[in-house]
Amino acid sequence: MPRSGSAAAAGGHARAAVTVIVGEEELLVERAVRAVVAEATAPGEPGGAAAGEAAGAAGGLAGADPPDVHDVRAADLRPGDLSGLTAPSLFGGGCVVIVRSVQDATKDVAAELTRQAAAPGPDVVLVLTHSGGAKNKQLLASLASDGARRVDCPPVKRFGERLDFLRAEFGRAGRKADDGGLRALLDAVGTDLRELAAACSQLVADTTGVISQPVVARYYRGRAEATGFTVADRAIEGKLADALEQLRWALSTGVSPVLISSALAQGVRALGRVGTAARTRSAEALAGELGMPPWKIDRVRQQLRGWNAEGVARAHGVVAEADAQVKGEGASPGYALELAITSIVACRSRS
């Protein structure tokens, strides 16, 4: 989520007139840009609620006429273009100039941006975005030394960070979701922030009360794999009653027992793979080696609490037997899955 850096200290005209938004998380960058533009163009008291999380230093531009808003990419600018965009209008009202991806600016354009940021016009607001990488990093340093307000939009990679993002989305809408609902939403939708934000909006609009796992499941029941993984997660976490409840719900809505068995097997295998990896290495460093996204590694590390190597080994045997039963060796796939879940929880408890 966007957060202001140390360069956002209050006071000074340049701090109010120039904001640099740093990061590659597109949804958060776009929200921060909209917040700063809303802040700059809002009438009335400066620093109003329209500024959102990126607010803090600048009020609306002076004048009764609304400011012009120019939205350009740094790579498309030629030397002198910025001066034309920030020139005073015959009709007054000032201007807001959004320059995106300033890391791609040419040397001459970067120098022009630095000069403009050091001495912005009285009715000019500059909003600059930078990916945060090494390219054109000196421009970031120059903007900071000139007092530009900085808003960081760091990537949301870890499982816990995504949970926090979802909580914030529901909180901004005045709603609450329990941990089961949040996990179910991640399972069903994935890790793309735009899709997660859209899913939150849909659930807020279409439901009432606390957003729980059954509520999420009603809207994503077509995603059978996600339902199977939800059952597996509850079993691996030792939550027997929840796991059996999710199993019965999944089977009643037509989820294939084979998919649920596969999810149990993948969950137990993940315990073994992550459990044998060095805990001193970050999830990002292990992602390529283990073939899992970092957020999945973070989740499995949380699930490993309460497990030992012997318990994981016994659970491997349980899921192998369950897979055979579900695929034809047993008379009742549902009973085989219930037995497997009970045995997996027991394996964890004995650990």
Image (cartoon, helix red, strand yellow):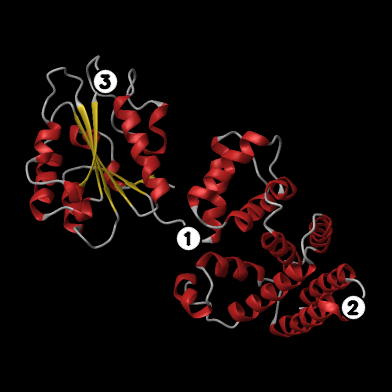
Q: Residue at x 79, y 68 (%)?
A: 257
Q: Position of residue 13 (x, y in %)?
A: 19, 32
Task: State left or right for residue 105 relative to residue 317.
Answer: left
Q: In the rendering, which numbered label is found on residue 66?
A: 3
Q: Position of residue 238 (x, y in %)?
A: 77, 67
Rendered position, 55 above or below 62:
below
Of pointers 3 and 2, the one earlier in the residue sequence: 3
Q: In the rendering, which numbered label is found on residue 330?
A: 2
**Structural distance between the alpha carbons of marks 2 and 1:** 41 Å
Q: Position of residue 282 (x, y in %)?
A: 47, 72
Q: In the rendering, which numbered label is found on residue 260?
A: none
Amino acid tagged 2: Gly
**Structural distance between the alpha carbons of marks 3 and 1:** 39 Å
The residue carrying mark 1 is 157
Amino acid tagged 3: Pro
Of pointers 3 and 1, the one earlier in the residue sequence: 3
Q: Is residue 55 visible?
A: no
- Badge 1: residue crowd in 10 Å (few <14, some 14–19, many ≥20): some
Asked which secondary structure carries label 1, the reply is loop
